[in-house]
Amino acid sequence: MFTSANAPPMPEINIFTQSSSPDVIIAQVSASDSELKSWAQKQTRFPSRDIASLSNHRQLEHLAVDKAMLELSAPWSTAQITHDENGKPALLAIDKFISISHHAQGTLCSVIICLGNHAVGCDIERPRAQLHTISKRFLSQQEQNYFTTTPLLCCAWGIKESMFKTIGHGIDFRIDLIVNAIPSSVENPFEATGSIKGEPTQWRIWKVQFHNAKDKDADALYAIAGPV
C-alpha cells in the first residue's frame, strides 16, 4: 500500500480481545506527543471536554477510548461520551450503559470498555505490591485471609472497582461488595462470583498481555468486566 511521506502520523492500536454479553473491547494504543496534539484538536468523541487542555497522560487515556470505540460496530463506533460530576461516563443520545478503565504508561495506554443494556462496570489493573498494604481498606477479614497473592489481590480489587461502578457512591467496599473464591484457572478469560449488597453477580476476568515489541517485558494486566 502506498503511503504519502507527508501523511500525518497515526496512533497505533493493538486489539487484545472483543467479546459480548456484555460487549467488551480490550486494546492498547500508542501515540507520540505530536499525534496526541493533532487528535486532541480535532476529536469529537468527548464534546463536553476540552481535551487539548489536558496533560499528555490524560489525552492518551481519552485517545485510547476513542480508537477502541472506532473498532466496534454501530452505534458504538460513532457514539459520543459525556461524564457526570463524579467523572462517570455516559453515552449521548444512546440508551445504553458504558464503563471505561485505562492504564497508561509512557506512550502506551491499555484500555477496557464495557457496554450493555444494564449498568455495567469494568477495570484494568497491573499487579502491584502496594495492594498488600491497602487490602484491609477494601477487603473483609475473610477476603484478606483468602486473597493473599498479588495477582489474587489485583483481581479482587478490580472486581470491587467494577462492582462500584455499577452502583455508584455510598458503598462500603468491605461490607457491601463481596468477592467469592477466584478460580485458579489456565483458561483466559475466566469468571469469578461475588455479590453487591447481597445480590449475586458474576464477573469475567482476562489476563492481558500485549505481544508487541514496545511492551514485551511488561507484566500482565488484569481486566475485569460485568456483570455477565
Image (spheres, rainbow, N blue to C red):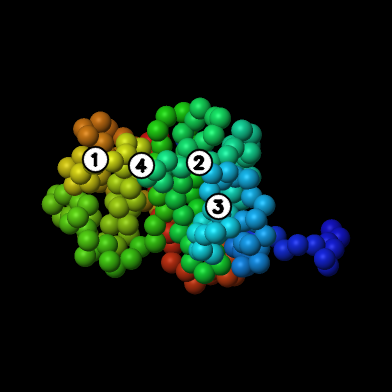
Instruction: Compute the Cα span from label 1 to label 2.
Output: 22 Å
x and y percentages locating residue 77 in the rendered image: 62, 40
Residue type, numbered disc 4:
Lys
Q: Amino acid at mark 2?
A: Thr
- Which callout, 3 or 2, points to the residue nearer the camera? 3
Q: Is residue 69 left or right of residue 200?
A: right
What amino acid type should be assigned to the residue bearing mark 1? Gly
Label 1: which residue? 170
Quadrant for residue 130, please give it.
bottom left
Mark nearer the N terminus (1 vs 2): 2
Above or below, 137 relative to 44: below
Q: Which residue is mark 4?
A: 165
The residue located at (54%, 34%) in the rendering is 92
Q: Name the residue tied to disc 2.
A: 82
Question: Looking at the image, is mark 1 or mark 4 earlier in the sequence?
Answer: 4
Is label 3 or label 1 in front? 3
Q: Are marks 1 and 4 in contact (CB under 8 Å)?
A: no
